[in-house]
Image (spheres, rainbow, N blue to C red):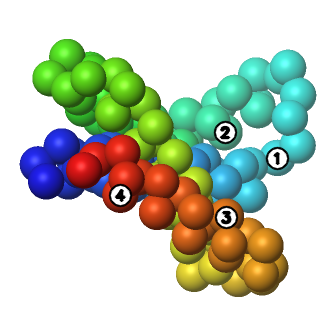
Amino acid sequence: MWKFILCVLQSAMLAGGQVFLKFALQRMPAFSWSRAFFLSVFQNWHFAACGLLFASASLLWMYIVKAFPLSVAYPMISLSYVFGILAAIFFFKEEVTLSQWLGVALIIIGCMLIVK
């Protein structure tokens, strides 16, 4: 159970980082190799939050990989897809198809089978 909780937390952090990355990119000008563009990156708190979540998820991942079998830990990252779809619905008002919900269900079932 403990490894499942840690893997869920790490996956949620990965998905949260992606959400903040999307928020950051929505508030930035079009990409260019200009000084102004790169300054906009570092003046965007969403981008900073993205980096913090990715860094934290990476540190937690290092602990998970060291403490648990890779055959259990690695497939659990797929839970980030579940959190990503939920974030798409709640934060970006995207519609999710029936086949996407089926995929979510299969990911959850697969993770439950792996952790047992």
Q: Secondary structure at mark 4?
A: helix
Q: Secondary structure at mark 3?
A: helix
Task: Please report the residue visible at 65 percent of the width from the left and 31 percent of the height from the top.
Answer: 39
Q: Earlier in the sequence, mark 3 or mark 4?
A: 3
Q: Earlier in the sequence, mark 4 or mark 2?
A: 2
Q: Which residue carries the number 2 mark?
A: 40
Residue 21 in percent (x, y) is at 60, 48
Label 4 or label 2, whichever lies nearer to me, is: 4
Examine the rendered structure and indicate whether residue 17 appears above or below residue 109. Answer: above
Q: Which residue carries the number 4 mark?
A: 112
Which residue occupies the extreme left position in the image?
Answer: 2
Q: Which residue carries the number 1 mark?
A: 29
> Would you call the spot at circle 4 few (<14 residues within 10 Å), some (14-19), or many (20 or more)?
few
Pointer 3 with pointer 2, Cβ within 8 A: no
Q: Which residue carries the number 3 mark?
A: 103
Residue 114 in percent (x, y) is at 36, 45
